[in-house]
Image (cartoon, grey):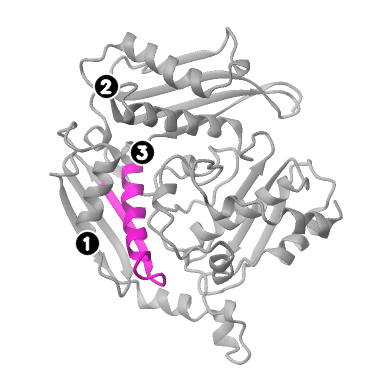
Amino acid sequence: MSKNYLFTSESVSEGHPDKVADQISDAILDAILAKDKDARVACETTVTTGLVLVVGEISTSAYVDIQSVVRKTITDIGYDGSNPGFDGNSCAVLVALDEQSPDIAQGVDDALERRDNNKDIDPLDQIGAGDQGFVFGFATNETKEFMPLPISLAHKLMRKTAEVRKNGTIDYLMPDAKSQVTIEYDENDHPVRVDTIVLSTQHKAEASLDQVKKDIKKYVIDEVVPANMMDDKTKILINPTGRFVIGGPEGDSGLTGRKVIVDTYGGFARHGGGAFSGKDATKVDRSASYAARYIAKNLVAAGVAEKVEIQIAYAIGVARPVSIHVDTFGTSDFSEEQIEKCINEFFDLRPLGIIEMLDLQRPIYKKTAAYGHFGRTDIDLPWEKLDKVDDIKNFLHI
């Protein structure tokens, strides 16, 4: 670009109604995977005042007390009686779960490659993609997490808000919160300053707006945002409506999968449309998104490009991707063909290949259901590892 520009991303807290739903769906997934790693799970949750509805398709040999998982997830977030409109101890929990459709199951369990050639079949060709679709993965070198700065700061603000709520530093805070960060970039696409911060947080009725503003600025924003990124023109808007007492599922209904941009790159990269939470790893809109991030991050860390976006597309019931596309936005000395050859050399993008490469048949998902699935430094996630950097450098002679 020929001039400076602004870019904005948002995050939401674990107490946001959509994130409550995501965490319930992933908590159920984890509880099932802990007992049956081969389970097929597609679990959707709706939350509203006094009610949780869990629906979906699950095929498993395990028994899980869904009601207990739901209630513990809600109370762990902080809806434990202090918010009478939504309390994990007393809300109604309705469960309506079916088995996975046999029409879908036959394509997942017995991929097209296996059906077409049942002799000398590669074991990794056994499982087909759980649906058609395409996913994106992205990485950039503008932060140490290899994430865009707007979403990185937005997530950190939300994690810090939850921290000061839970440890009592700001004892009047309630679980629901949102943040939004606007970054000014220069003509070379490098972040130069924070232009605007918006942070809205639920609070108890007795807290004044002035007190909320003072405490959030001191204990959250000043602790998270680098001082050298703010100046006298930076706008800080804290609870700009003036009052945020009614929140969480009492204030707005929540649904699994409704914060897909928060979950990924804050709008900085494209999105295939598929949500993550509540889905086992045979669903490529989840597992392949993780693989695409894994590839992009290792490519950037290896110095292949300053930023990389990977697209991977699948057909239902077919193991091998129908297409792979690489975009380095003019920041690489390597051709996209060279990079794609490198990807094919070191990354198996068949569903079972991804599952084995990233060890995805484990109960690791609930912790991803709030504060983003990518760029996490507070938890250990397999798709964030940089264990392919040396292989990439050697292959491309970097």
Q: Nearer the viewer, residue 165 or 298?
A: 165
Q: Name the residue under label 1.
A: 65
Q: Residues within 10 Å of mark 2 (few under 14, many from 20)?
A: some
| Horizontal and vertical percent position of residue 229 | 61, 18
Q: Name the residue under label 2.
A: 172
Q: In this view, does 172 lie to the left or right of 229?
A: left
Label 2, label 3: how far apart the Cα atoms are: 17 Å
Q: Name the residue under label 3.
A: 14
Question: Taking 188 as reference, is 127 above or below it?
Answer: below
Q: In this view, does 357 lie to the left or right of 340?
A: left
Magenta span includes 44:
yes
Label 1, label 3: how far apart the Cα atoms are: 22 Å
Q: Residue 223 carries which label?
A: none
Q: Quadrant of residue 318?
A: bottom right
Q: Which of marks 2 and 1 is nearer the N terminus?
A: 1
Q: In which quarter of the image is residue 216?
A: top left
Question: Taking 90 as reference, is 337 above or below it?
Answer: below
For the record, the magenta segment spans: 19-46
Question: Taking 162 as reference, is 210 above or below it?
Answer: above
* Element type at mark 2: loop
Single out the mark in the foreground, 2 or 3. Answer: 2
* Element type at mark 3: loop
Q: Which of marks 2 and 3 is nearer the N terminus?
A: 3
